[in-house]
Image (cartoon, grey):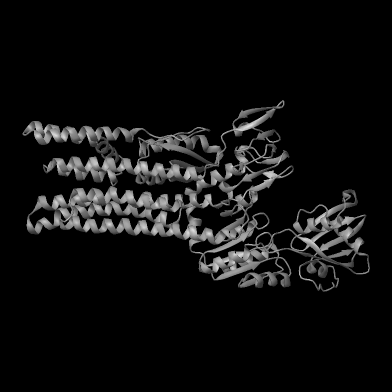
């Protein structure tokens, strides 16, 4: 089982990385994730040891990060620590004491400087001492404590106090920026309903959405959010689904139509019977996916975390060498010590450790606003580097709404052929079966049908009026030893045999989606050169659609396991995506580097099976998703190059004596702020 809790007072991304490493090493913990951006802790653990592990998690958190507090409770809201605002008052007090110290000479001035120093930085000094006691030496508290103490001991009181003051103010602004970005992403995903109007004894009572049970009836007034998934019992209206699909065109609904949570009722009054509890509703699943997306980390994120663990000890060693080796030759110990302290201040890796996960989080939030759900940074990274896209045909590139275009009997009447086919297909939920029943146009007497058996990739068999009926493709007929008639029309051919005698065939056709050609062209413009179709349909039908859309390869008449084998043959030369309907393509979706479902609003199977979900079944969203992923990866690379480039340059300047403490603080806090602001561009 997996549990996620909010965590308070987690002050820095380095702290999050240390805590994650500690929790991951706990006994019985299968996986642990500490998300600094979301301020959450997740653990995966076996249910029978859950209570024991909870206590271990709390104890380990208290050991590694004593200030942090995990809130273990079933229902929780957003919690914010109040420590940072107090910092500003302390900075103000330190400034007053510093000014007084500059005016007063002698030992009283020194006392004022020390008081100013303690006022602004006592928490940093305590954290550094505590961490050293726990064997966790190399973090930003240690770097700042050593640098500022060094300046104070050298008599550079103003500089030592200023380093801590600027660092504290910078951290405050940094935290505000992260909180603002988190709030901005939450605003983009503002689809969570506040209440539901539950109908009880003819009266509408305002209740929390999670208090409504499946089967109960709710009232949705014009202007209100749809709080739960359901079916319209009375009324008609238009729904704004922009928060779910990214498309502004309203969707009309009337009696018998499905409505999904998160959309907004624009006009009419709707009476809706609830079909899903709030926890299983579309809106809850979408929010859960976006909030949990930070747990699937990209290679860039993992690299930065590993980099920070190695980088900080290395720069500390470099600072020691800088303070010791050069003065052995020129004797200027104080000058090189000052340069070493400046070097330490510059070296904090916060800009990288914060901005990279924040960029991915922003990109995922921005994509969700466009109706594109990306389940993690690793899938974002794979999307950006796609080399091949493999499509299912029915419901992906085509509408999936079939109709019978020809009835070709052999030795029986057309009506008799159609009736027997409709009866055999009467229990089928497949679009082809539904089209046969629709073409029959009469009520089906289910009592005439028994022993229906699905034959994977071939069709089905059934007993109709006591006679054995086989309905399916040419492979099924060949297995029965029957010769079929060649179809002259283009489309999917459904053959039928009764008691071992071939009765003829039906031709069923499907229409290509209006945006399918634009999607294929958009993929080519994005540099995806290999575009493949895998389908169980006939070769002629598949080839016609492939030619119409400009696909580069087509493989037809495949069984479900054949699709997996064909996909596996494409793997290994860069990321490969499979695009399917998320219902009957689950094995292939899971096998691909990126499984992309044409989800449709409210399709549970699609949301569960895929790594990326296009919420409105529009294939044109696919090149847009790749564009968003590539822009996000571009910002990630910009932040890595910018942060490392500036830091290395200023570190070199510090070592050469060109950069002072003030520039060093900018190279730490200023670069982090700029990287955070750049990361927030991914939301657009």
**Residue at 65 percent of width and 65 percent of height:** 563
Q: Is residue 257 left or right of residue 528?
A: right
Q: Is residue 388 toward the left or the right of residue 321 in the image?
A: right
Pinpoint residue 272: horizontal percent, then vertical percent: 69, 37
Q: Is 102 situated above or below 310? A: above
Q: Residue at x 10, y 52 (%)?
A: 333
**Image quadrant of residue 63?**
top left
Can residue 313 be spotted in the picture?
Answer: yes
Residue 506 position in % (x across, y down): 83, 65
Question: Looking at the image, which residue sits at the far front?
Answer: 267
Residue sitting nearer the eye, 684 or 130: 684
Residue 128 location, quadrant: top left
Which residue is at the front of the view, 268 or 286? 268
Is 128 rendered above or below residue 620? above
Quadrant of image for the N terminus: top right
Residue 488 at x, y percent in the picture: 81, 74
Q: What number of labels is visible?
A: 0
Q: Is residue 404 above or below residue 302?
A: below
Is residue 35 in view from this perspective? no
- In the shown orientation, is residue 475 left or right of residue 12? right
Rendered residue at 82%/74% (across/down): 486
Q: Position of residue 41 (x, y in %)?
A: 45, 41
Within the image, what quadrant is residue 141 found in? Answer: top left
């Amino acid at each position: 089982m997996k549990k996620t809790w909010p965590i308070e007072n987690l002050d820095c991304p380095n702290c999050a990385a240390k805590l994650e490493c500690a929790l991951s090493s706990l006994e019985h913990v299968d996986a642990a994730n500490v998300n600094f951006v979301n301020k959450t802790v997740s653990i995966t653990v076996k249910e029978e040891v859950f209570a024991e592990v909870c206590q271990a998690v709390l104890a380990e958190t208290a050991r590694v990060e004593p200030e942090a507090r995990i809130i273990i409770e079933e229902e929780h809201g957003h919690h914010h620590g109040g420590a940072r605002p107090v910092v500003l008052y302390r900075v103000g007090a330190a400034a007053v004491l510093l000014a007084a110290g500059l005016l007063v000479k002698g030992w009283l001035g020194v006392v004022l400087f020390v008081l100013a120093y303690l006022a602004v930085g006592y928490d940093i000094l305590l954290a550094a001492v505590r961490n050293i006691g726990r064997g966790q030496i190399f973090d930003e508290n240690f770097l700042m404590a050593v640098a500022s103490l060094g300046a104070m001991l050298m008599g550079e009181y103003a500089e030592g106090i200023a380093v801590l003051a600027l660092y504290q103010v910078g951290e405050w602004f940094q935290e505000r920026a992260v909180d603002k970005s988190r709030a901005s992403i939450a605003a983009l995903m503002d689809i969570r309903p506040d209440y539901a109007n539950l109908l009880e004894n003819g009266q509408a009572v305002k209740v929390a959405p999670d208090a409504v049970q499946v089967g109960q009836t709710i009232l949705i007034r014009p202007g209100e959010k749809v709080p739960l998934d359901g079916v319209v019992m009375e009324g008609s209206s238009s729904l704004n689904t922009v928060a779910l699909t990214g498309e502004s065109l309203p969707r009309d609904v009337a009696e018998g139509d499905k409505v999904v949570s998160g959309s907004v009722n624009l006009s009419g009054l709707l009476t809706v019977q609830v079909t899903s509890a709030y926890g299983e509703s579309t809106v809850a699943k979408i929010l859960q996916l976006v909030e949990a997306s930070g747990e699937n980390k990209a290679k860039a994120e993992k690299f930065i975390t590993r980099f920070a663990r190695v980088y900080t000890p290395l720069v500390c060693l470099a600072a020691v060498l800088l303070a010791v080796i050069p003065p052995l030759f020129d004797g200027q110990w104080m000058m090189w010590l000052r340069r070493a302290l400046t070097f330490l201040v510059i070296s904090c890796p916060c800009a990288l450790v914060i901005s990279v996960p924040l960029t991915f989080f922003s990109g995922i939030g921005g994509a969700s606003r466009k109706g594109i759900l990306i389940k993690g940074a690793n899938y974002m990274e794979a999307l950006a580097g796609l080399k091949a896209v493999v499509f299912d045909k029915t419901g992906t590139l085509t509408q999936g709404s079939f109709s019978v275009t020809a009835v070709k009997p052999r030795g029986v009447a057309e009506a008799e052929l159609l009736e027997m086919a409709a009866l055999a297909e009467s229990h089928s939920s497949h679009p082809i079966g539904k089209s046969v029943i629709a073409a029959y146009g009469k009520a089906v007497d289910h009592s005439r049908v028994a022993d229906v058996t699905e034959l994977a990739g071939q069709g089905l068999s059934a007993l109709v009026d006591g006679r054995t009926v086989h309905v399916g493709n040419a492979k099924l007929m060949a297995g029965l030893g029957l010769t079929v008639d060649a179809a002259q029309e283009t489309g999917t051919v459904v053959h039928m045999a009764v008691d071992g005698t071939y009765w003829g065939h039906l031709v069923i056709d499907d229409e290509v989606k209006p945006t399918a050609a634009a999607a294929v062209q958009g993929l080519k413009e994005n540099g995806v050169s290999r575009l493949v179709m895998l389908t169980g349909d006939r070769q002629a039908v598949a080839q016609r659609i492939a030619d119409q859309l400009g696909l580069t390869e087509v493989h037809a008449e495949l069984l479900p396991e054949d699709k997996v084998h064909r996909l596996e043959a494409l793997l290994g030369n860069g990321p490969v995506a499979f695009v399917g309907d998320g219902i009957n393509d689950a094995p292939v979706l899971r096998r691909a580097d990126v499984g992309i479902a044409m989800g449709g609003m409210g399709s549970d199977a699609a949301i569960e099976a895929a790594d990326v979900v296009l919420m409105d079944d529009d294939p044109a969203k696919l090149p847009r998703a790749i564009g968003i992923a590539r822009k996000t990866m571009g910002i990630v690379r910009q932040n890595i190059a910018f942060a490392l480039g500036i830091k290395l340059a200023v570190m070199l300047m510090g070592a050469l004596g060109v950069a002072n403490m003030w520039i060093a603080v900018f190279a730490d806090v200023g670069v982090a702020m700029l990287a955070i602001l750049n990361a927030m561009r991914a939301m657009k």
